[in-house]
Amino acid sequence: MTDQEKLALLEETFEMDAGSLKPEMKLDDVESFDSIAKLSLIVLMDDEFGKIIKSDDIKALTTVQDLLNIMTKA
């Protein structure tokens, strides 16, 4: 899966407009990255990538690129 495909998947998960996420963006600046989005991310990572992530793992992420980096098949 390419980074563009991963970004599109994240935008869909976070209910954002296509093309609105950029790898260099800080997660604190992503308005829709709220508690519901974080729960959706946990489900997405399990369903799509076979990875179990915890809230502490999410707290350690600071940029969209960090999200892309963890989105690899187990």
Image (cartoon, grey):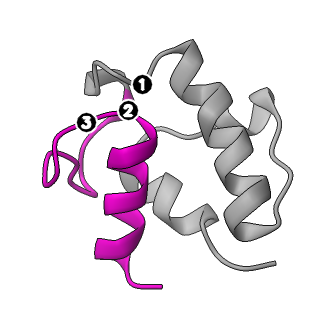
Which residue is identified by label 1? Answer: 33
Residue sitting at x 49%, y 54% = 66
Q: Amino acid at mark 2?
A: Leu
- The quarter of the picture where the C terminus appears is bottom right
Q: Looking at the picture, how far across and down is residue 9, in whole percent?
A: 42, 58
- Give the mark nearest the N terminus, 2 or 3: 3
**Which of label 3 and label 1 is nearer to you?**
3
Image quadrant in which you'd find residue 71: bottom right
Which residue is identified by label 2? Answer: 27
Q: Are marks 1 and 2 in contact (CB under 8 Å)?
A: yes
Indicate whether 59 appears above or below 13.
Answer: above
| Residue 59 makes an appearance in the image | no
Which residue is identified by label 3? Answer: 16
Q: Looking at the picture, how far across and down is residue 10, in whole percent?
A: 42, 50
Residue sitting at x 77%, y 28% = 55
Q: Amino acid at mark 1?
A: Phe
Q: Nearer the viewer, residue 65 or 41?
A: 41
